């Protein structure tokens, strides 16, 4: 697979994750596959996935403060962890058909998720990033972060995902 074909497949996989999963559409996910430049002044690693979403009234958990619901925060971190686990799996599936790679997306599931809520989810927009801590044949462990548009770290998470 040429680098262009690989990038086209990754773009298609990210589009599938963003547009075909109804819950992700509900949350308003916008997924970027990035280069080393900072995004909204939050530095991300080369090739890292960033999930962006805007604050909306439907996502409020504390109406007095106007902050995100904790379930939204954990769902976003879980989704990002699952996505980076899938992207890690794709590296090991090099040489397989694109159909086989997409089929493996359906086999990924969360085994464990730990979320540390550090601050209230207050902001106009949010960025979630993630990276792989360890990837094996059956299980992948990831680390995720959620920042607001003011660069404030809102929450961190660690996720364990079945990938095989």
Image (cartoon, rainbow, N blue to C red):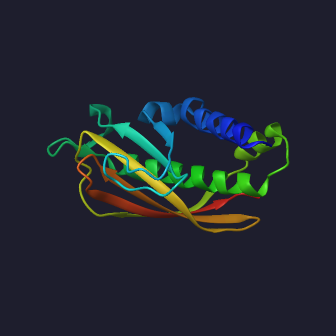
Numbered marks: total: 0
Is 40 located above or below residue 120 in the figure? Answer: above
| Residue 109 visible here | no
Quadrant where the N terminus sits is top right
Q: Is residue 3 left or right of residue 85?
A: right
Could you say where residue 102 lies in the image, as x and y percent from the top left? 74, 40
Residue at the spot 58% in from the left edge and 54% down from the top edge: 84
Residue at the spot 74% in from the left edge and 64% down from the top edge: 138
Could you say where residue 17 lies in the image, as x and y percent from the top left? 59, 37
Could you say where residue 76 lies in the image, as x and y percent from the top left? 45, 48
| Residue 12 position by quadrant | top right
Residue at the spot 85% in from the left edge and 46% down from the top edge: 96
The residue at the far left in this view is: 64
Could you say where residue 148 lies in the image, as x and y percent from the top left? 28, 49
Task: In this rendered view, identify the residue nearer to me: 103 or 15.
Answer: 15
Task: In this rendered view, identify the residue nearer to me: 40 or 78.
Answer: 40
Residue at the spot 37% in from the left edge and 47% down from the top edge: 39
The residue at the far right in this view is: 96
Is 51 located above or below residue 85 in the figure? Answer: above
| Residue 131 visible here | yes
Task: In this rendered view, identify the residue nearer to me: 92 or 121.
Answer: 92
Q: Is residue 34 left or right of residue 14?
A: left
Quadrant where the C terminus sits is bottom right
């Amino acid at each position: 697979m040429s680098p262009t074909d690989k990038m086209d497949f990754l773009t298609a996989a990210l589009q599938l994750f963003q547009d075909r999963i109804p819950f992700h559409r509900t949350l308003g996910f916008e997924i970027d596959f990035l280069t080393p430049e900072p995004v909204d002044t939050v530095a991300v690693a080369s090739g890292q996935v960033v999930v962006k979403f805007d604050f909306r009234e439907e996502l409020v958990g504390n109406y007095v403060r106007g902050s995100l619901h904790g379930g939204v925060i954990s769902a976003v971190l879980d989704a990002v962890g699952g996505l980076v686990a899938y992207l890690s799996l794709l590296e090991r599936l090099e040489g397989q058909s694109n159909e086989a790679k997409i089929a493996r997306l359906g086999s990924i599931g969360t085994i464990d998720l730990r979320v540390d809520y550090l601050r209230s989810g207050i902001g106009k927009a949010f960025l979630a990033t993630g990276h792989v801590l360890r990837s094996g044949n059956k299980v992948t462990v990831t680390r995720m972060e959620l920042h607001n548009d003011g660069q404030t770290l809102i929450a961190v998470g660690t996720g364990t995902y079945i990938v095989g």
